[in-house]
Image (cartoon, rainbow, N blue to C red):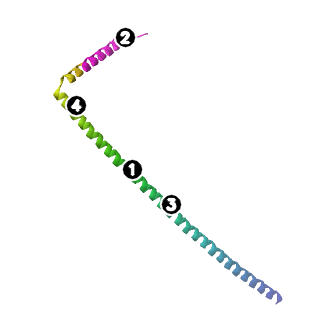
């Protein structure tokens, strides 16, 4: 019977040790879980901050792009106005005195004819070298 008491006591000690180990494991699991939840919360905050920074940067870039587009549009309109004025001025000058334009066009036609004729002479029959 002594062996039986010793066996019973050993089993009881094993059960107690298992309970203690289970409680320690539960405590450790709870601690690890708490730490992981804290880290996840911290990462969420960091991601939210990063998202706000990216959004602010994108907003700044969009504002700058809109400003640049407005400036380019204004400059284009200004160039178009100036070109229109100069075209009107040139049309008036031609209407008032067409002779300089006719002379300039005649000189341009003669120069073009000269260069075309010269180019044709260069590309006419050339004996092939064999």
- The numbered mark at residue 35 is none
Q: What x and y, as percent, mark residue 51?
A: 48, 61
Q: In which quarter of the image is residue 1?
A: bottom right
Between 77 and 123, the one nearer to me in the picture: 77
- The numbered mark at residue 50 is 3
The residue tagged with tag 2: helix, strand or loop? loop
**Residue span colored magenta:** 107-130
List the residue tagged with mark 1: 65
Label 4: how many Cα within 10 Å (few below 14, some 14–19, many 20+): few
Q: Earlier in the sequence, mark 4 or mark 1?
A: 1
- At x 75%, y 83%, the residue is 13
- The numbered mark at residue 126 is 2
The residue tagged with tag 4: helix, strand or loop? helix
- Is most of the magenta stretch helix, strand or loop? helix
Q: What x and y, as percent, mark residue 109?
A: 25, 19
Is 56 on the left-hand or right-hand side of 100? right
List the residue tagged with mark 4: 90
């Amino acid at each position: 019977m002594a062996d039986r008491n010793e066996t019973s006591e050993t089993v009881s000690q094993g059960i107690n040790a298992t309970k203690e180990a289970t409680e320690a494991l539960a405590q450790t699991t709870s601690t690890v879980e708490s730490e992981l939840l804290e880290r996840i919360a911290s990462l969420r905050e960091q991601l939210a901050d990063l998202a706000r920074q990216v959004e602010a940067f994108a907003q700044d870039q969009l504002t700058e792009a809109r400003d640049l587009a407005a400036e380019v549009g204004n400059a284009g309109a200004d160039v178009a106005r100036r070109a229109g004025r100069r075209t009107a001025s040139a049309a008036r000058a031609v209407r008032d005195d067409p002779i300089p334009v006719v002379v300039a066009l005649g000189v341009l036609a003669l120069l073009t004819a000269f260069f075309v004729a010269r180019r044709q002479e260069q590309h006419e029959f050339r004996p092939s070298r064999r």
